[in-house]
Image (cartoon, helix red, strand yellow):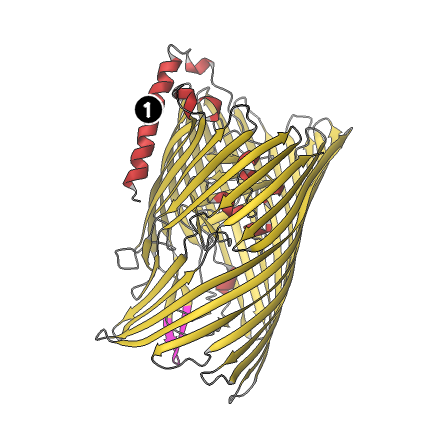
Amino acid sequence: MTLRAPIHFLILCFIALSAKAEERLGDSPDPTTSINKVQRVEVLGHKDDRRSSTATKTVILEADIVRYGDNSLVDVLKRVPGISVRGVQGKGGEVRMRGLGSGYTQVMLNGERAPPGFSLDSISPELIERIEVARAATADASTQAIAGSINIILKRKVDMSRRDIKLGASSDGGEPSLAVDGLFSDRDGDFSYTISGGIGRSKSVDLSLVDQEELNAAGQLRLARVTSKRDFGQSDRLNLAPRLMWDLGHGDSINLESLLRLQHSEGGGKELRLTGLGEQPPLVQDFTRSVSDSSQFRSKLTVLHQLASGAKLDLKLGATYNRRESDSQLEGYDAKDLPALSRNINSLASDYGLSLSGKYLNGYIEGHSFVTGWEAEYNWRAEDRLRQEIAYGKPSVYRDDSYTAKVERLAVFAQDEWEILPQWSLYMGLRWEGIATQSEGNTLDDVANRSAVLSPILQTLWKFAEKDQLRFALSRTYKAPNTRDLIPRRNVANDNSATTPDTKGNPDLRPELAWGADLAIEHYLEKGGVLSASIYARQIDDVILPTLMKINGLWVSQPFNQGRALLRGLELEAKFNLKQYWPDAPALDIRTNVAANWSEVESIAGPDNRLDQQTPVSANFGVDYKLPGEFLTLGGNYNFQSAAKTQLSNTQAAINPAKRTLDVYGLWKISPAMQLRISFANILAEDHIAESLYTDQNGIRQQTTTSQSEMTARAVLEMRL
């Protein structure tokens, strides 16, 4: 599949549907008399309509989140326009906007940057009310979002008394998983509550092969090795998300929302290395076993106060706590099947966080929505790692590492949304954000790093016809160095090589700074349909890239700021009901989108000098069909991500083949209070392949990892009591 085919398909859809829409409009009234009033940019966390908001974003509602019965939020996001996922299908992965991950994509929870240690896999889709995908920054949220932001809004609204139960079962490669999720909400006078949560157990078996080859400068093979891996695991989880709300009258309210997740995991694996040519490795086979317990807690108290002048004051006090304790063992054997290595690692990592923020909202002039505010956040991480190792024939190793890291963040901002004309609105924002990090430990030098970024933001919306509008955004965003990349601690690889080096942090890293522009045109159809096309561009300075070095005979990778990168791309989206425009066609709801991305890192020689192994093309085609009577709905989605070779440096390269997934589902409404959802994910079950290359004057080293994936079958019984 090439880029040309999906673009041509969408362009034809746009032309045909626009023509049909114009025929039905006929002599429409003056558009300025029917345009809705502009709504505020997200400041209070309420649902904001994509069409009328000045800020550019896409909203994924609950019906779309639960449509395929996904166990993981990552699987939900892969179908969203402009988002791709890197990793083995059905095993989680890294979520990317504009093809970029690694901190370029910001993840937020209820409008605030996710705390340290947060993972998208830790949130069950059943806990989510909606997801907002913002392609341009706003001043009231962190501007650490060069590629964009994904905002996860947990269920909170209480319209009526609800008692919902979901019973789910699935099979992945023959391994069963079970889950029970529920939502309970009610109101008693001025007090209301929502409690959602669930428990579940999942099992997995992962198979993979690693092929390693080395060629000398003359092109002669000097190493050929195949490593087979088999990993298994079992995980038990508990999620709980209560929200309590008190309406104090006169516009005042108090909200307390929390999120708790507990997880216990056990697993193990076996690796066998077969060398056909070259020197035998120190370990020919090894066996691993691990046990881990993790807990995550987040709570936020929000106080809303209506002032006599009509202004509003929004104060929030938050706390987070994450803890992960693990114990792992490795027993390795040499070519003669004799014990060669015994290693035991015990680790304990804890994250604590406090935050305090405030917003002042005042429409001081008619047609304006002015907001100013501040945010203060303190995070502290402590980690202990005890490593005991016996390498037979060598001295024993006993290493007790401990370190602490502190991150302080302070931000102030102001923004104004101005309705200049009924069909034209302008958003202006300014945000200053400063970050200070400090780390210390018993085996590393103390590290301190400070950075600050001033971010001006401008967005505008022009409604030039009743159903057509144009958006433009200009913003300053940034990407702060990861805390772990600032700590000069050396992490040792089991099999040190040019493709699997040791890693070490750099305390002198500076943040990456970016200027970005976004332009979009949208045409809205009846019943929620939309046709849109958008383009974007980013210029990033002080890009952080890993540098590979050989120190005392061992390969070490360390990050450095290395100049500029340029990004650009386009996104097309079409969502419509086929029968609405072709009466003789089946009653199909169509959802299709395609995104194309390009980037160049100036400090790396091209071609293929992409940033962060950027995904060049991603596309989705989805369809839903309701049978007459609407008791049965059938649907499916095809997802495609194109192949890409990325030049990581002048000596290193990575190759990611094309990725294709097909998911289908069926929803049977047994009664008004009960329905059964059956889905099959990853029907194509394509293996995940990742290849890395190292080339210098001495030859080539190539490593290819092939991970097996399986189709997943799920059944979820949903009941309203």
Q: Is residue 319 above or below residue 345?
A: above
In-image side of 35 versus 303 (left or right) = left
| SS of the residue under disc 1 | helix
In-image side of 556 versus 60 (left or right) = left
**On-image quarter of the C terminus:** top right
Q: Amino acid at mark 1?
A: Ala
Which residue is farthest bottom? 393
Residue 319 place in picture, x, y as percent? 67, 50
Observer-nearest of 45 and 332: 332
In-image side of 263 versus 448 (left or right) = right
Residue 603 seen in this snapshot = yes
Q: Is residue 335 above or below residue 82?
A: below
Residue hosting label 1: 16
Residue 45 place in picture, x, y as percent? 60, 36
Magenta range is 549-557
Observer-nearest of 572 and 690: 690
Residue 536 place in picture, x, y as percent? 36, 40
Whether residue 132 appears in magenta in the rendering, the answer is no
Residue 448 place in picture, x, y as percent? 53, 64
Whether residue 554 appears in magenta in the rendering, the answer is yes
Which residue is farthest right? 188
Instruction: Find residue 547 and report its image quarter.
Output: bottom left
Residue drawn at 46 percent across, 66 percent down: 506
**On-image quarter of the N terminus:** top left
Residue 246 seen in this snapshot = no
Q: Is residue 52 above or below residue 88?
A: above
What is the crowding at mark 1: few (fewer than 14 residues within 10 Å), some, or many (at least 20)? few
